[in-house]
Image (cartoon, grey):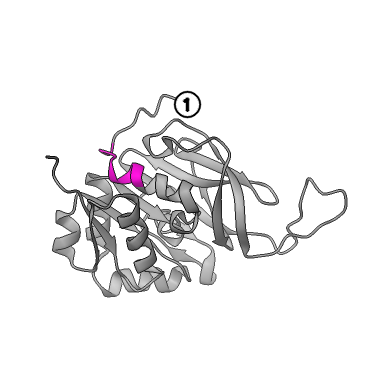
Amino acid sequence: MSRQISIAVIDYGMGNLHSVAKALEHADSQAEVKVTADKQVIASADRVLLPGVGAMRDCMGEMQRLDLVDTIKQAAASKPFLGICIGMQALMTHSEENGGVDCLNIIPGNVERFADDLSDPTASGDEHLKIPHMGWNQVHQQIKHPLWQNIPQNQRFYFVHSYFVVPQSPDPVAGSTVYGHPLCVALAADNIFATQFHPEKSADAGLQLFHNFINWDGSYDSSTCS
């Protein structure tokens, strides 16, 4: 009988943590999912998930207040780690949000805001796009990765965001979409995977990604592209 996989969903007061936990449990009923801010529980978990919605200043402020920054960095350096939405953006070096906020600097790059005059390049007229970007968009898989397993190319996922990541190098870009212009919406770096979209709101495709994460050992061949 295989050992039960434990997953720590980091609770720093940002995001719909219990919907993420319920989706993980639905993706694999054998997984042990804990929503926690306990550093020892996070350190001992087999997998760690950093969720989040809201403002980056509040996000980083709560991580610091709860003394979780080093624990998060250690988890991101040592075990399968998944960031979602603000949890993805927080992995970057710096965010433009709230007048500028330093982030965790785990993946080099910045977080930028969509332009107010963002327009649809495929429209016949000058059609302005709404900010925040909210709804379903196709995600193009840029690499072959265990977390994309059994998820069709250009599958639609659900987004809610006004900011997007711009990695310093194209190397970690694992998925992209187009909203006014091409943008990175998934990152992969060693044992880290992160998504701008919300798997917990993305129906079967999101559950499949969670299932893949639960069964991922944290390795992938970064030289293999799709």
Where residue 128 sits in the image (x, y, percent)? 78, 60
For disc 1, the marked residue is 225
Task: Count numbered badges in the picture.
Answer: 1
| Residue 129 appears in view | yes
Residue at 18% from the left image edge and 68% from the top image edge: 38
40 versus 196 height, above or below: below
User: Would residue 9 appear left or right of 207 to someone viewing this image?
Assistant: left
Q: Point out the residue furthest to the top here.
A: 224
Say left or right for 161 vs 119.
left
The x and y percentages for residue 88 are: 43, 55
Quadrant into which the N terminus falls: top left
Percent position of residue 18, x then y: 34, 68
Q: Nearer the viewer, residue 62 or 131?
A: 131
The answer to which image quadrant residue 138 occupies is top right
Look at the picture and state if 21 lies above or below 78: below
Q: Position of residue 132 (x, y in %)?
A: 62, 65
Q: SS class of the residue under badge 1?
A: loop
Residue 38 placement, left or right of 125: left
Residue ID at (46%, 58%): 85
Give the side of residue 202 with respect to residue 125, left or right. Answer: left
Dot 1 crowding, Cα within 10 Å, few <14, some 14–19, many 20+? few
Read off the magenta span.
211-218
- Viewer-closest of 186 and 139: 139
The answer to whether any part of residue 107 appears in the image is: no
Q: Is residue 215 magenta?
A: yes
Is 26 magenta? The answer is no
Above or below, 116 relative to 144: below
Type of amino acid under label 1: Cys
> What residue lies at 50% left-to-right and 26% top-to-bottom?
226
